[in-house]
Image (tube, helix red, strand yellow):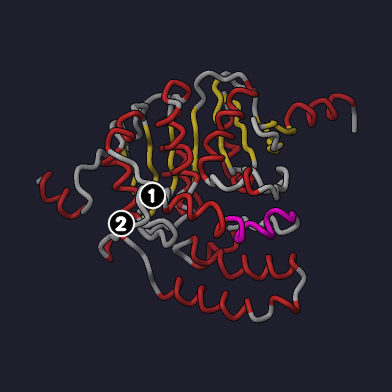
């Protein structure tokens, strides 16, 4: 490796140390004047690095995830998603960016929204992709969810896999687990091979479901965001959500668009939890336009949870 290559690696990869001493691994792509921070984004890097033209993208692993420090101290884990919000602020400060744009996929869609509510002056634009719903207690009509046979079959296969756990190495179990799980993230099973999110070579990722169940998900379930809290996030928010999302119901994307004061929704028909895989032109085209400062053509204001009712009103 030449010296310039070594310098590039040292510049583009490294660690950010949080206020309580946890080191978060980051990978930086691009060197443009506008900065986008993508928490928990390393599994998105291959697909999303196309956004780097004219921008600097900062992907990083959350605490206790990926190549970030493994954490065993309960005091550094017990706040769950609230730790993630403060860690995002630590990343922003580390890079000296006053108002980055933020992208959050899945439950990190909640993380970036919470950040915008708590630190409204330190975020410019926010993209939520397939975000988990604002309240986990909320039940949506069947037409706004996709609890189908594919999901039930995947859960049944995972239950069977659990019986083999003692006979498999942690990495083997992780790979088998993801070979089953990835099918639920796409509407077309033919696209399942494009989901490579497991990162099973990393011990933190092999233990991530335990961490999720013990700390992250309970902290999300405990959230009770009042209308006044949503109102604090006045920045432009683009929500991109597939109608066939099995992991984060489409109704949740619509609800975020209704609750946040300056939000619009891009609905991706017949796409699941990874809509950029199944409709890349729609998804990346919309995100590019939004990050460039305009609402994409496909973005809509949402006034009703039920899209059929909203369509009737428009007629």
Q: Nearer the viewer, residue 228 or 236?
A: 228
> How far, Cα to Cα, is label 2 from label 1?
17 Å
* Image-based side of 283 in relation to 263, left or right: right
What residue does disc 1 label?
Answer: 241
The residue at the point 75 percent across, 33 percent down is: 14
Instruction: Single out the residue that lies furthest toward the front.
Output: 75
Q: Secondary structure at mark 1?
A: strand
What residue does disc 2 label?
Answer: 138
Residue 309, given in percent of the width and then of the height, sits at 15, 53
The residue at the point 60 percent across, 37 percent down is: 49
Q: Nearer the viewer, mark 2 or mark 1?
A: 2
Residue 259, given in percent of the width and then of the height, sits at 28, 40
Q: Which residues are magenta?
A: 202-211
In contact (CB < 8 Å): disc 2 and disc 1: no
Crowd around label 2: few <14 · some 14–19 · many ≥20 (10 Å): few
The residue at the point 54 percent across, 47 percent down is: 80
Residue 127, given in percent of the width and then of the height, sits at 44, 37
Residue 209: image quadrant is: bottom right
Q: Secondary structure at mark 2?
A: loop
């Amino acid at each position: 490796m030449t010296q310039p290559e070594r310098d590039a690696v040292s510049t583009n990869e490294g660690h950010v140390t949080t206020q309580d001493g946890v080191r978060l691994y980051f990978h930086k792509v691009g060197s443009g004047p506008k900065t986008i921070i993508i928490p928990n984004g390393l599994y998105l890097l291959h697909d999303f690095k196309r956004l780097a033209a004219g921008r600097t993208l900062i992907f990083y692993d959350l605490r206790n995830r990926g190549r970030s420090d493994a954490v065993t101290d309960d005091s550094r884990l017990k706040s769950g998603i609230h730790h993630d919000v403060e860690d995002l602020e630590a990343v922003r400060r580390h890079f000296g960016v006053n108002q980055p744009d933020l992208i959050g996929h899945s439950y990190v869609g909640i993380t970036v929204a919470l950040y915008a509510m708590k630190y409204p002056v330190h975020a410019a634009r926010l993209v939520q992709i397939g975000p988990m719903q604002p309240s986990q207690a909320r039940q949506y009509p069947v037409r706004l969810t996709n609890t189908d046979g594919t999901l039930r079959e995947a859960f049944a296969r995972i239950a069977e896999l659990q019986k083999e756990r003692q006979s498999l190495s942690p990495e083997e179990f992780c790979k088998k687990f993801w070979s089953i799980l990835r099918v639920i993230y796409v509407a077309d099973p033919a696209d399942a091979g494009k989901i490579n999110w497991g990162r099973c070579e990393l011990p933190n990722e092999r233990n991530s479901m335990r961490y999720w169940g013990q700390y992250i998900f309970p902290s999300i379930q405990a959230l009770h965001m009042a209308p006044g809290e949503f109102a604090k996030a006045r920045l432009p928010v683009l929500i991109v959500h597939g109608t066939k999302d099995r992991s984060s119901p489409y109704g949740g994307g619509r609800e975020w668009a209704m609750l946040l004061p300056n939000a619009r929704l891009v609905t991706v028909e017949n796409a699941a939890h990874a809509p950029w895989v199944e409709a890349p032109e729609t998804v990346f085209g919309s995100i590019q336009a939004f990050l460039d400062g305009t609402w994409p053509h496909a973005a809509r204001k949402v006034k009703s949870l039920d899209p059929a009712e909203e369509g009737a009103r428009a007629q």
